[in-house]
C-alpha cells in the first residue's frame, strides 16, 4: 500500500534535515575560517592596502553566518526532494562549490595566494550558478536561497581583484614573526 505524505509530514522531514544541515554547514565554515587567522587577526592581511569598497571587518562574519544558514536550509530542501532526477547532480554541484568555498580562507589568509584565491572565487561563481540552476529544477525555493551567496561572491571577486591591484606583491609580504599563519587543529 502506497500513501502520499501530508504537507505536515513533508515539512517535518525538511525540518529534520535542516536541524542537521544548518549546524553542519556552519561548523564547516567556522572550522575553515579558523585554519588561518583572518581579518584584523592576520598581520599579513592588516599590512595590505585595502580598496575603498572594503566593508568593516565585522561585516564578514555576519555575512558568512547568514550565507551558511541559507546554504544549510537550501541543502535540506534539496536533500528532502526525493524522486527528483536532478537531486543527485544538484547535491554534487553543491558539494563541489562547498569544497572550494571551505578551501578559500586557508589559501588566501594562510598561504597568501591572492591570485589563486581570485581564481577560486571565479570558479565558485560558476559553480554556484550551476548549483542554482540545478537547485531550481529540484526546488525553486532552495535556488532562491543561493542568491545572497551568489551576490556576495560577485562582491568578493570585485573586492579581491581591487585588493590584488593595490597589492601586486601581496604574496611576498612577510608577516610579523609573532603570529602563525596556519593553525593545525
Image: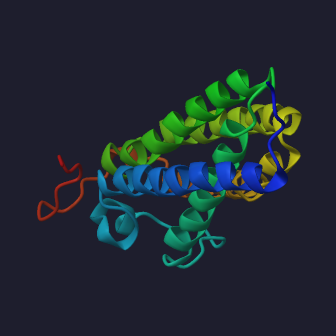
Q: Position of residue 73 (x, y in %)?
A: 66, 54
Residue at position x 48%, y 66% in the image: 49
Left or right: 124 in relation to 154: left
Please tell me whether residue 46 is drawn above or below residue 168 in the rendered image.
below
Left or right: 170 in relation to 16: left
Going by the picture, which residue comes out furthest to the left? 178
Question: What colour scheme governs how the chains and residues are painted in the rendered image of this protein?
Answer: rainbow
Tally of numbered tags: 0
Is 96 or 154 nearer to us in this picture?
A: 96
Residue at position x 30%, y 70% in the image: 41
Quarter of the image with the N terminus in it: top right
Residue at position x 23%, y 49% in the image: 182
Is 32 or 7 nearer to us in this picture?
A: 7
Q: Position of residue 151 (x, y in %)?
A: 76, 56
Residue 161 in view (yes/no): no
Residue at position x 78%, y 57% in the image: 8
Left or right: 90 in relation to 107: right
Q: Position of residue 11 (x, y in %)?
A: 74, 55
Q: Position of residue 93 (x, y in %)?
A: 66, 28
Residue 89 in view (yes/no): yes
Amino acid at each position: 500500500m502506497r500513501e502520499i505524505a501530508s504537507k505536515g509530514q513533508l515539512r517535518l522531514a525538511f525540518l529534520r534535515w535542516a536541524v542537521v544541515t544548518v549546524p553542519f554547514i556552519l561548523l564547516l565554515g567556522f572550522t575553515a575560517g579558523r585554519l588561518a587567522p583572518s581579518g584584523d587577526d592576520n598581520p599579513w592581511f592588516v599590512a595590505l592596502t585595502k580598496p575603498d569598497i572594503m566593508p568593516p571587518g565585522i561585516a564578514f562574519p555576519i555575512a558568512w553566518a547568514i550565507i551558511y544558514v541559507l546554504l544549510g536550509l537550501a541543502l535540506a530542501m534539496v536533500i528532502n526532494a526525493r524522486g527528483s532526477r536532478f537531486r543527485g547532480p544538484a547535491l554534487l554541484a553543491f558539494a563541489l562549490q562547498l569544497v572550494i568555498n571551505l578551501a578559500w580562507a586557508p589559501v588566501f589568509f594562510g598561504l597568501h595566494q591572492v591570485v589563486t584565491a581570485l581564481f577560486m572565487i571565479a570558479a565558485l561563481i560558476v559553480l554556484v550558478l550551476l548549483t542554482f540552476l540545478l537547485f531550481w529544477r529540484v526546488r525553486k525555493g532552495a535556488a532562491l536561497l543561493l542568491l545572497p551567496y551568489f551576490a556576495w561572491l560577485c562582491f568578493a571577486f570585485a573586492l579581491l581583484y581591487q585588493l590584488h591591484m593595490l597589492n601586486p606583491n601581496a604574496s611576498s609580504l612577510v608577516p610579523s614573526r609573532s603570529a602563525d599563519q596556519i593553525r593545525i587543529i
